[in-house]
Amino acid sequence: MTEENKIREDHSYRDFPVEIIGLKDLTSDTRYFKVRCLNEDMKNKFNYKPGQFVIFSIPGVGEATFSISSPPTRRDFVEFGMRKVGTFTEAFFKLKEGDVFNMRGPYGNGFEMESLKGRDIIIVAGGLGAVPLRSVLLYAEDRREEFNQVFFLNGARSPDDMLFREDFMAMAARGIVDTRLSVDKDPTGEWPYDVGFVTTLIPQLAEKIKAENTTALICGPPGMYRFVIQELLKLNVPKDQILMTLERRMKCGQGHCGHCVVGGRYTCLDGPIFTYYDVQHEKELI
């Protein structure tokens, strides 16, 4: 079989129809979508890892990349979070429950969950970074027995800006994953958790983890990475066990446009998951 035919048979290069079966606003400009595959064969072939992404397309409008926000442990649907930031997302926000659009994927390297078995895991999310890391978080909760300690640290500008706020508060109450939530400011004075940057939560783990057996996963706004990494290094978390998802740099998602190239790396093809050890000297990446 030729390489060209192999590519043609690879379902990740083929659009397939999905139906919106649920949606709700997470914040004033960010919306949650739940979809199901209309083709049973494609549903069975759609296998992905937390941290991977897909491409949505609407005929006559365009296409864009979006991170998967649900875990592969839940097979009947796929979830996403989308912020309205341009022409495509504005058109997408007009879709309603029951509407159908095209999707293809998955793409990217994703998180290797097998390599995390038996380890302490620190998941650090800021703002929109909660969308891709939610896939890892729910995977860890669904298969909690496979991992050692699991910590989820999530920060937002204010309570109203926290994505999946009710879900994460319910997770904190369940206690299956050690969930710690913070906001930069609390205008109402009624926020029941920490107030401060998400980095202030990291020192709380100093006496709880064994650094050599710890992996940290990070996603958030550009300005967050450097400060989170500094705090993790203070805990002696190994540089090659600090994993960052940098999907925010992507555009076409397939290595065509060159928008995400830094230091000879394509974020969409070589990532979006990178270790801090691999990119510590490429400042443009973080």
Image (cartoon, grey):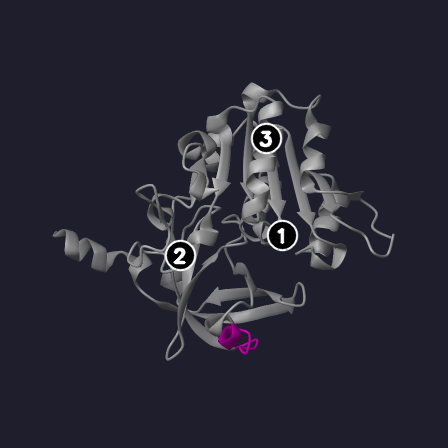
Closer mark to the observer between disc 1 and disc 3: 3
- Secondary structure predominantly adopted by residues drawn in magenta: loop
- Span highlighted in magenta in the image: 90-98
**Which of pointers 1 and 3 lies earlier in the amino acid sequence?**
1
Label 1, secondary structure: give it. helix
- Amino acid carrying label 1: it is Gly
Residue 73, position in %: x, y?
52, 48
Residue drawn where x is 47% and y is 33% of the image: 276
Q: In screen coordinates, is 69 left or right of 268?
A: right
- Amino acid carrying label 2: it is Asn
The numbered dot on residue 230 is 3
Q: Is residue 132 magenta?
A: no
Dot 1: within a 10 Å radius of its alpha carbon, few (fewer than 14), some, or many (20 or more) residues?
some
Residue 41, position in %: x, y?
36, 62
Q: Is residue 177 above or below residue 134?
A: above
Residue 209, position in %: x, y?
65, 23
